[in-house]
Amino acid sequence: MNNNANIKQFQLIKFLNENCNDDHVISRISIVLRRDKLEAPYYMNTKIRLSSCLDNGEKGLIHAMNILNHSRMYNLTEDKYNEIRTMIIHTFEDNESEQVEFSKNDKQIKIAIMSKNDEEFKNLYENYHELFEKIDNLID
């Protein structure tokens, strides 16, 4: 977190994953870069969702609970847009997997990252922490 009370969203999701006792925390991170809007030509939207799946069939309870649903929209400078765009393409373009989706066209780049447990999230955060930190540091 920072002193201005702005949420550093990737630090927050890391904190929640590290401090949640449930082994079945599902994380989904979506980042979309766009450059087709007239009023905001260099635009980024991030969405983070955390869910915990509770399953207690003996008591008749099967329940999915949202822990966090956070979205942030950014108006970026052209330089910062290009920096993040290059980083995303370099990191994700040829690295799709069960956990990572990547798509790109003339107007937008989209990545979606999903983990189904703590260990998967730790690995994803370790692999992509540079991008997450760069985005978190935009609000300092």
Image: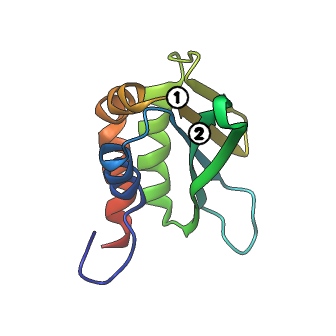
Q: Picture coordinates of residue 56 (x, y %)?
A: 61, 34
Among the 4 quarters of the image, the one containing residue 9: bottom left
**Residue at x 67%, y 44% (from the top left corner):** 64
Q: Is residue 108 above or below residue 39?
A: above
In the image, farthest residue toward the front: 59
- Does 93 sit above or below residue 62? above
Quarter of the rendering containing residue 59: top right
**Comparing marks 2 and 1, which lies closer to the viewer?**
2
Left or right for 103, reference 135: right
In the figure, residue 124 lies in which quadrant? top left
Count of labels shown? 2
Q: Residue furthest bottom?
A: 4
Disc marking residue 54: 2
Residue visible at 33% across and 55% down in the picture: 11
Question: Which callout, 2 or 1, points at the residue further toward the start of the chain?
Answer: 2
Image location of residue 47, percent across then percent down? 59, 54
The answer to whether 47 appears left or right of 2 in the picture is: right
